[in-house]
Image (tube, rainbow, N blue to C red):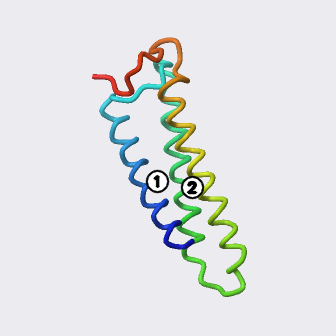
Amino acid sequence: MKLLFRLVCLLYALSGAAFVGLSWTGHLAFGHGLGDLFYHAAHVVGYLLLLGAAWAVGKAKNPEWTRPSQLLRAVLLVLMLLHVRELGWQLTVGRGVEYSWNGQLFYP
């Protein structure tokens, strides 16, 4: 479970870095014009909060925390996967009216 947790955290951190990089270059859009700033900020804060929580749970070495940390790892894994799923949905089918979904994820 610990190896899976570390692997998912690494992939989650890489997807966060890719999201920030593509957002700064203007290749990702949520379709709300200036309102995209809110979505970009919310997802960056979400990435930072979940990665911070994963780091804190990963650093817990107290033996009496063994059971709760396994449960917290499982909950964090589910939250990370749901966050990436929600981000994918908002960048594709759930786009706003200014840049509605046209079958392409990236903008030139």
Badge 2 density bin: few <14, some 14–19, many ≥20, Cα 10 Å: some
- Dot 2 lies on which element? helix
Earlier residue among tags 2 and 1: 1
Q: Residue at x 44, y 15 (%)?
A: 99
Left or right placement of residue 20 versus residue 32 in this view: left
Residue that appears at 40% across and 41% down? 19
| Residue 64 falls in image quadrant | bottom right
Q: Quadrant of the C terminus?
A: top left
Spot the residue most to the left: 108
Find residue 84 and report its horizontal and vertical position in percent.
52, 44
Image coordinates of residue 58 in percent, x first then y, are 55, 72
Depth order, front residue of 104/17: 104
Picture disc at residue 24: none
Considering every residue shown, the one lying at the far bottom of the view is 63
Tell me residue 77's x, y (percent): 59, 58
Which label sits in the foreground, 2 or 1? 1
Query: Residue pushed farthest top?
Result: 97
Residue 32 point in image, percent of width and height: 50, 19
Count the numbered circles shown.
2
How many other residues sit within 10 Å of disc 1, few (<14), some (14-19) or many (≥20)?
many
Q: Quadrant location of the N terminus?
A: bottom right
- Residue tagged 2: 50
Do tag 2 and tag 1 residues touch (Cβ < 8 Å)?
Answer: yes
Relative to 107, does residue 46 appear above or below in the rendering?
A: below
List the residue tagged with mark 1. 12
- 66, above or below 88, in the image: below
Q: Mark 1 belongs to which amino acid?
A: Tyr
Residue at x 38%, y 48% (from the top left corner): 17
Amino acid type at circle 2 is Leu
| Residue 19 relative to residue 79: left or right | left
How far apart are the alpha carbons under marks 2 and 1?
9 Å
